[in-house]
Amino acid sequence: MPEALHLGQPRVCASMLNTVRNQMHPLTLRVSILVAFTLAAVRAADAQYQPIDLGTLGGTESSAAAVNNNGQVVGYSYTAGNVEVHAFSWTAVGGMVDLGTLGGLVSFAFAVSENGQVVGSSHTGNNEVHAFSWTAAGGMVDLGTFGGSNSVAVDVSDSGRVVGSSMSAGNAATHAFSWTASGGMVDLGTLGGPLSEARAVSESGQVVGYSYTAGNPEAQAFSWTAAGGMVDLGTLRGGASVSVDVSNRGQVVGYSAAAGAFSWTPSGGMVDLGTLGGASYAYAVNEGGQVVGYSYTAGNEYHAFAWTAARGMIDLGTFGGGSSVAVDVSDSGQAVGYIDTGYAFSWTADGGMAGLGALPDDINSAATAVNNNGQVVGYSWGLDTIPHATMWLLPITVTSALDKLIDQVTAYSLQKGLTNALTVKLKAALASWQTGRSNAAVHQIGAFVHQIIAKRDKALTEAQADTLIRMANEIVQAIKTGTAL
């Protein structure tokens, strides 16, 4: 299994202990990532996407781990002097924000909800590592442990349910947990053995991961619900199994050592997704049931795949002579990942595999996540540089984007006076843009956003306001960063 994936994607690392060890040694993490790729001095040729440098917290290195549908990015960055590593949250409006630590020198953010809740782990003042939850209103909250020294949070639902793993008293065992602000940390138990770890959570509160069973030295995939507890999902033809992701429809995906990638549903049980000739591993599933991951081929290369019930496993290919891994997929079916020769990629059924390129001074990149708006995040680096958190944006035409925003306002059938007031501002911005006055266009879009905020929860629902603000912010970001055509 490609080592870079395990280092770069904490959700699929070998165990919580390995996650904590990586966090304890961030320089080792960076070096391992760089060594894992061959630094080919060839830039990906495709130029559909525009890479944007998300910056750092004052140090030389940063990396993005996740992005929500509002364009909020989380990850880690070195601070000034490169002594400390801190979790960050980045937005187009606010830039990169330092989330701080729980008293130590190091923190990492691994996941972010649609509501902006960030989770990860941080060193404490006594050099333990604890899971945290961060919100803009409440800051960083220590989720505690089951009595041991270490815990890690790896995923969070929009309702605020955080999942991860924690050590017990004396570090004798590691158990999966679920945490909420009202209920605190709840032990999800095990399948009879001393260890369980959570990997992902759905909006209904379904938690998936793996656990050891009584007397069995091999892990078994599990699904946990408040009503049914922890259920052993079994394996494909024996051996160990691990579940790594779950959709809001209850579809669980992962891999079984004896066979390969699997999909599991309560009604259909565990289904073998097949291979491209060798072992296969699933890593993410979207709400349409599309699964992505990678599989070894008969020639012992590994290629990214996409699987659907209708079409089976599709080889997404590669380019530049390297192997490929898909690590995330949007609900529209856009898969992202990396080529082991150092290129981030995006794949769609219509366009195939496209290289995302790298930042101007870099030649290598890797994608770690994608949202439903097509924003891809990861990191980019060069022969003599270290990684910077990167977002890849599709170039947009400001004119068409403003027209689309005007259409969206009209489609909501708001009060006539409000519709007119909003569209007047957007049409003024459009006129400014088309006559080369980009600063004026930004100010006029800003006035539009201010009016939306004033009418939120009044003449506009929260969902309507959030959609309009997101669309407006994307246009402003495109203008400011030069991604607009």
Image: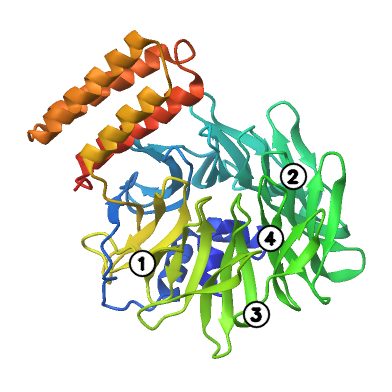
Whichever of labels 2 and 4 marks the residue nearer the N terminus, that label is 2
Q: Residues within 10 Å of mark 4 (few under 14, many from 20)?
A: many
Label 2 near label 1: C-beta < 8 Å?
no
Circle 2 residue: 206
Q: Residues within 10 Å of mark 3 (few under 14, many from 20)?
A: many
**For numbered disc 3, what is the local secondary structure?**
strand
Task: Decide which of 4, 203 is in the foreground and name it.
Answer: 203
Q: Amino acid at mark 3?
A: Ala
Circle 1 residue: 354
Going 27% across and 20% down the picture, which residue do you hit?
A: 423
- Residue 393: x percent and y percent? 32, 50
**For numbered disc 4, what is the local secondary structure?**
strand
Circle 4 residue: 253
Q: CA distance from mark 4 to mark 3?
A: 15 Å
Whichever of labels 1 and 3 marks the residue nearer the N terminus, that label is 3
Q: CA distance from mark 1 to mark 4?
A: 25 Å
Label 3 near label 1: C-beta < 8 Å?
no
**For numbered disc 1, what is the local secondary structure?**
strand
Whichever of labels 4 and 3 marks the residue nearer the N terminus, that label is 4
Of all residues shown, which one is farthest toward the left? 435
Q: CA distance from mark 3 to mark 2?
A: 27 Å
Using residue 202 as the reference point, say whether residue 418 is left or right of it: left
**For numbered disc 2, what is the local secondary structure?**
loop
Task: Decide which of 352, 456 is in the foreground and name it.
Answer: 352
Q: CA distance from mark 1 to mark 3?
A: 25 Å
Q: CA distance from mark 1 to mark 2?
A: 34 Å
